[in-house]
Image: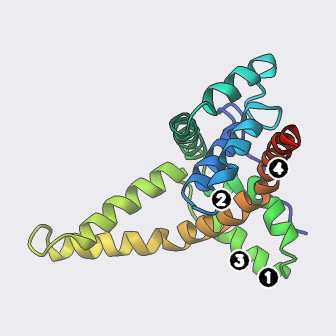
Amino acid sequence: MKKYNKMAKQTKPDFQKYQYGALAGRFLASKESGRYAPGALEVLAGAKGLDLGEEALGFIRGTQASEKGIQTAAGIYTGKFEEKRGEYTPAELANWYGPVLAYANLEKKDQDKILATLNEHDETLNAIREASEKANYIVDAPDGLFTDEQKDRAKKLVEKYQKVLLVINVLDNYKFESLRSDAVTVTSATDLKGLASKL
């Protein structure tokens, strides 16, 4: 199996500690999975996330006191996750995605294509997304707002980043799906304890 790139920027804050906050945000965006958001926030407070220790209970009770508390916490930690992860280049994210690629049982040539796409750009994920959003705005703008030359340059920029953003989006879906079981386990334990107390 191909060896993944080491995250060279070890001095940067570790975005992985916020990943369960981002998972809670994804859960809340889905009607079917929204009930697991509190479990994801509980995992976020624990050793797999922020590792709050004794303070975890206060964090959990505070965030889970209301729907608004859950939504606010999920929003805050999704933002922190995206901000910190965005400081890395796509190539530096290969280790984070490594388990997804390993479990997929891909042929080496397919895995190599995905890793090569992650290695195509030296810019950070934040820089790529910002440049792509600006270029998309120019491409989609009403006629007359930008020159044909500006629109052509913008189209080329959109095409330049299209593949890597697609790969990241698909890998994100599977990465967050792999984290889901932790949140479901915590949620089921809470629900079943509540059920048992009523029996």
Going from N to C along the chain, the mark reached first, 2 or 4, is 2
Residue closer to the observer: 152 or 199:
199
Residue 105 in view, yes or no:
yes
Instruction: Return the mark for residue 33.
Output: 2
Element type at marker 4? Answer: helix
Q: Nearer the viewer, mark 4 or mark 3?
A: 4
Say which residue appears at 53% left-offset and 36% top-offset: 76
Say which amino acid is labelled 3: Lys
Residue type at numbered disc 1 = Lys
Callout 3–callout 1 Cβ contact below 8 Å: yes
Task: Name which quarter of the figure residue 14 lies in.
Answer: top right
Seen in the picture, residue 60 relative to 67 is either above or below; the reply is above
Instruction: Count up the numbered dots.
Output: 4
Residue 152 location, x and y as percent?
27, 76
* Inter-mark Cα distance, 4 to 3: 39 Å
CA gap between label 1 and label 4 equals 40 Å
| Residue labelled with disc 1 | 109
User: Which residue ends up furthest to the front in the rendered image?
Assistant: 199
Q: Give above or below for 138 relative to 53.
A: below
Residue underneath mark 4: 188
Name the N-terminal-most of marks 1 and 4.
Answer: 1
Residue type beneath disc 2: Ser
The local crowd at label 3, few if under 14, some if 14 to 19, many if 20 or more residues have their Cα within 10 Å, is few
Residue 82: image x %, image y %?
55, 46
Tag 3 or tag 4, which sits nearer the N-term?
A: 3
